Image (cartoon, rainbow, N blue to C red):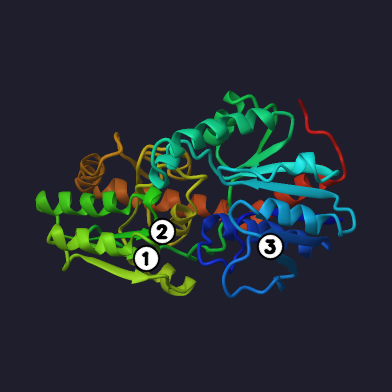
Amino acid sequence: MRFLMLNWRDPKNPKAGGAERVTLAYLSALVQRGHEVYWFANAFEGASREEIIQGIHIVRGGGTGTSILAARKWYRKQPRFDLVMDQHHGIPWYAPWWAGTHCVAYIHEVLGPIWDAFYPWPVSAFGRWQERWTHWFYRNVPFWTASSCTKETLHSHGVRYVKQIPYGVDTVALPELDAKPLASPLRLAVVSRLAPNKRIDHAIRAARCLVDRSVPVQLTVVGGGEMEAQLRKLVAELGMNGSVTFTGVLPEEEKDAVLRKAHLLLHTSQREGWGLNVIEANAMGTPAAVYPVAGLIESTLHDRTGVVSERETPESLAASIQSLLAHPEKYQQYRVNAWERAKTLHWSQVLPVASEWLEQQAAGRPSPA
């Protein structure tokens, strides 16, 4: 079979993130099952027009506002595809109306308030409005997502069928848990693209709150992005230079070492499709402390594999962490629960299910009503 993924970014795009990591895993699995797989994405400076990554044919063309036209022009010259996967990041590719074949819509999250983090009013208001109506426009197209929160929102916007498949991770869970008592200083980690919607400043402020409550901390921020300079300035303003370390983007092995050493992963995003780094941390025997937002309340099971704060504030997150410090036996149980759950979310468990569903869609087998 022939598959095509439409996504604004590909794995080599400087702004690629978790969405591209997940997409790469799904498409690589299809290649391994003997299918021919293409990925059309925006062009970017220094990128070749075409290349092959893990057996996937990467094709680049156009940019913001023009890549849909570039994709259509390229598509008309191709042999028929059995399935086109239209990946939405706020704005879709409208493939069901020009591809002439079976299509599914792939979505990581409904952006909603994330529009406000990137664009001023009235652009943000228009973005939220068009996103909602796009879902209604796509209401008869099968959707595919990881989070039940996203699934429920899509249904509320009129979408009739949504297939939910949880994300997997490449991180192999530790063969056994090593000892990690809640000793001072409390070691915290953030692993994220440093973008406005990730609210890394909230994690830094939560660390400051803990220090103000006489809890010594060491916060390690792993990742890069456009907010780094502002975040470094905030650390200095809060007098946290000795307590916060920025590592930049790390190779997987070094990132895993940070997660393994940390007592807790912090995640303060506005919302997530799932929260891959939560499960990666869990595989290293590290629970997470997260905000009560879509995606994160599923990747972290409150009072089982970590803690979910009551409110989306640094003070609330700090209070949840401080409360946990008073119950070290509960923390150790979280570690075990998180580690055991991470084993079930390795890609080896997830990809066969996803691949079979995509093959069914490509074969034209109708999704249940």
At x 41%, y 58%, the residue is 192
Numbered label attached to residue 192: 2
Q: Quadrant of residue 116?
A: top left
Helix or strand or loop: what does disc 3 sit on? loop
Residue 202 percent coordinates (x, y): 27, 49
Q: Amino acid at mark 2?
A: Ser
Are discs 1 and 3 less than 8 Å apart at CB?
A: no
Q: Is residue 289 above or below residue 229?
A: above
Q: Which quadrant: the C terminus?
A: top right
Q: Amino acid at mark 3?
A: Gly
Q: Is residue 132 left or right of residue 318?
A: right
Sooner in the amino-acid sequence: mark 1 or mark 3: 3
* C-alpha span from label 3 to label 2: 27 Å
Mark whose residue sits in front, 3 or 2: 3
Looking at the picture, how far across and down is residue 257, in whole percent?
39, 71
For disc 3, the marked residue is 61
**Residue bearing mark 1:** 222
Residue found 56% across the figure and 33% down from its top: 130
